[in-house]
Image (cartoon, rainbow, N blue to C red):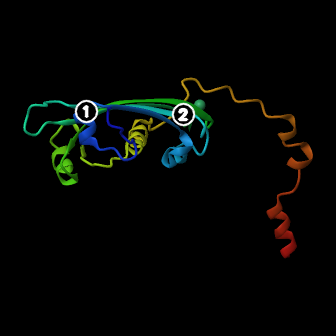
Amino acid sequence: MPKEFSAQRLDVKAFAEEGASLSGQAPVSAFERLMAETGGRGGDRLVTWSAQGALRNPHHVHPEIWLQLQAGARLSLICQRCLAPVDVDVAVDRSFRFVADETMAEAEDDESEEDLLALSRSFDLPALVEDEILMDLPLVPRHEECPEPLPAPVDDLPDEAESTKPNPFAVLGQLKK
Ligand SMILES: [Zn+2]
C-alpha cells in the first residue's frame, strides 16, 4: 500500500523517493495572506494545487530531491486604474530542489538558477502554495478594459440648495467676531 502523505506535514524526502503526488483545494478564506490581498473578497473561491515528488538522479549517493508544484486561483484584486475589483487568474508551475538545510538553501540560492528550499520532514505545502501565488500576483492589477463608470444616481448629485449654502468656515469666522 502506498504511503499516505500529509500536505501540511509533508515528509519531502520520502515523497520524492516514492515519486508520489498530492493534490488539494481550499477556499481562499483558508489563506490569511491571500485574504489580506483580496481585502476579504471572494473568500469562498477555491485555490487548487497539485504537487509531484521526484528524485532527479536516483542512483547517485546524494540524489537530488525535487518537488514540482502547480497551483491556480482566481483572486479579486483592486484595479489600479479605476479602483474597482478586478478578477486576476493566477497560475503557478514551478519546481523546487530541496537541500539539507536553510543555510545551504540560502548559500546556494544566489548562485543557482534553481529554486531551493530546505528539506523538512513536516513541510507545509499549503504555505508554499500561498507563497507562490503571492509572488505571482501582478504588481499593478488592472482591467484589460475598465468597466464604464456607472452614471451617478440622481439622488447623489449635489442639489442647488446645498451648493449655494455658505461655506461653513466663513460662518464660523462670523461667529467669532
Ligand atoms: Zn479598471
The residue lying toward the viewer, choosing from 65 and 102, is: 65
- Extreme left residue here? 61
Under circle 1, the secondary element is loop
Q: Residues within 10 Å of mark 2 (few under 14, many from 20)?
A: some
Splitting the image into 4 quarters, where does residue 83 fall? top right
What residue do we see at 58% from left, 32% from top? 86
- Measured as percent of width and height from the top left, residue 25 is found at 49, 34
Question: What amino acid type should be assigned to the residue bearing mark 1?
Answer: Glu
Under circle 2, the secondary element is strand
Does residue 138 lie above or below 99 as drawn? above
The residue lying toward the viewer, choosing from 159 and 77, is: 77
- Extreme top residue here? 145
The residue lying toward the viewer, choosing from 109 and 177, is: 109
2 vs 1, front mark: 1
- Measured as percent of width and height from the top left, residue 107 is found at 16, 50
Does residue 26 lie above or below 143 as drawn? below
Q: Which mark is residue 46?
A: 2
- Measured as percent of width and height from the top left, residue 59 is found at 9, 31
What residue do we see at 54% from left, 40% from top? 28
**Dividing the image into 4 quarters, which one contains the N terminus?**
top left
- Measured as percent of width and height from the top left, residue 53 is found at 28, 33
